[in-house]
Image (cartoon, rainbow, N blue to C red):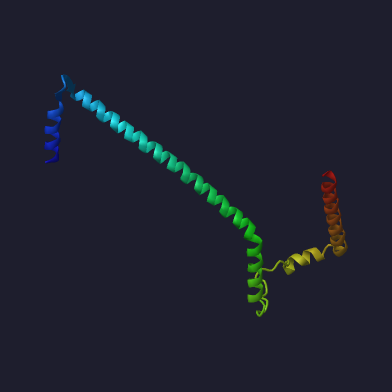
Amino acid sequence: MLWNYLAQFWQQISDVVVGGITYTADFFRNIGNAVAGALGQFFDVIFHNLNDVLVFLGWFFSNIKTIFLFLLSPVSYFFTFLKTFISALGQTPSSPAVSYAFSSDTMAVFDAIPHFDTFRVVLGAIIIFLGGVAILKLLLNT
């Protein structure tokens, strides 16, 4: 029904004479294209500017949230520590599930080495000394 109306309308405006000037279908088609282009450009500009504003607001509030999280992290840490400390205050400490000690077979191998206790103390002292030298070197370079 609507298409018949549009076809009749198009037949009527295919060639119109107004004031001695003949307006053809191309004239009306060009007016339609001009109006459609103007409306398209209008909405393109509006949507583009609206998108720019919304992207800026998203970026801005994301950075505000990050700043507040950085500012509140010490307070959050303190209250989390306090809550965990108070909740664990009345509980008995549990033994660790994982043991970091060597097995008895491994210790038997190390005990078979003569003067292993002395060697272990000297090796630990050398590692601590080298670590201290490395720290002093890093501190003196700056």
Residue drawn 64% across the image and 68% down it: 79
Question: Residue 110: x and y, percent?
Answer: 80, 63
Q: Quadrant of the N terminus?
A: top left
Q: Is residue 108 above or below residue 67?
A: below
Give the image quarter of residue 17. Answer: top left
Residue drawn 66% across the image and 80% down it: 90
Q: Is residue 110 left or right of residue 11?
A: right
Number of numbered markers: 0
Residue 114 appears anywhere in the view: no
Question: Residue 13: x and y, percent?
Answer: 15, 28
Q: Is residue 19 left or right of residue 107?
A: left
Question: Residue 125: x and y, percent?
Answer: 86, 58
Residue drawn 85% across the image and 64% down it: 117
Q: Is residue 128 left or right of residue 105?
A: right
| 31 vs 18, nearest the viewer | 18
Give the image quarter of residue 5. Answer: top left
Give the image quarter of residue 50. Answer: top left
Residue 115 appears anywhere in the view: yes
